[in-house]
Amino acid sequence: MSASSVVIRGIDARTFSEMESFVKDLEARPIERLLRDLEELASLSATKFSLVSYVMSSKFRGADATEKQSMRESVAATFEGLAAGETRDRVGQILDRMR
């Protein structure tokens, strides 16, 4: 699987300005695309993952009930498909925030 542009931007972000740009990119993405890239986004550094988690939580809070349910189901499916480890734990953290 090739990384999406938002994942590549996250990997490449080193400076504060680049991190800021990464967050703006995350915020601009439709939630469906972020959910599709969730496994790769959860594999980024702890700092970058915390930014991903923050943006996803914000999008979840702003969603209507149907969108929230769809988001929960997508994150749960990603969680279930991952092997035990840090990436799965991180996806589980996002899932916990969506309950």
Image (tube, helix red, strand yellow):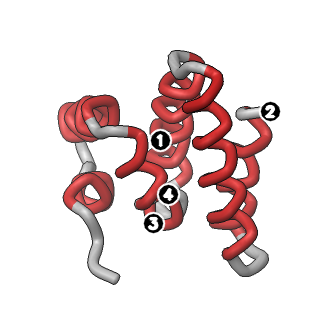
Q: In the image, is residue 57 above or below residue 10? A: above
Amino acid type of the residue tagged 1 in the rendering: Val
Classed neighbour count for the residue bearing mark 4: other residues with Cα under 10 Å, few (<14), some (14–19), many (≥20): many
**Percent x, y of residue 44:** 46, 60
The residues tagged by marks 4 and 3 sit, at their Cα atoms, a distance apart of 5 Å
**Location of residue 18 in the rendering, given as x and y in whole percent from the top left corner:** 20, 40
Identify the disc placed on residue 38: 4
First in sequence: mark 3 vs mark 2: 3
Counting residues from the start of the chain, the first of labels 4 and 2 encountered is 4
Q: CA distance from mark 1 to mark 4?
A: 9 Å
* Residue 76 shows in this picture: yes
Q: Which label lies toward us, 4 or 2? A: 2
Q: For this rendering, which residue is in front, 62 or 20?
A: 62
Dot 3 and dot 1 residues touching (CB under 8 Å) = no
Q: Are marks 4 and 3 in contact (CB under 8 Å)?
A: yes
Placement of the C terminus among the 4 image quadrants: top right
Position of residue 19 in the picture relative to residue 97 (left or right) = left
Read off the residue under disc 3. 40
Q: Nearer the viewer, residue 71 or 94?
A: 71
Q: Residue at x 74, y 69 (%)?
A: 80
Q: Nearer the viewer, mark 1 or mark 4?
A: 4
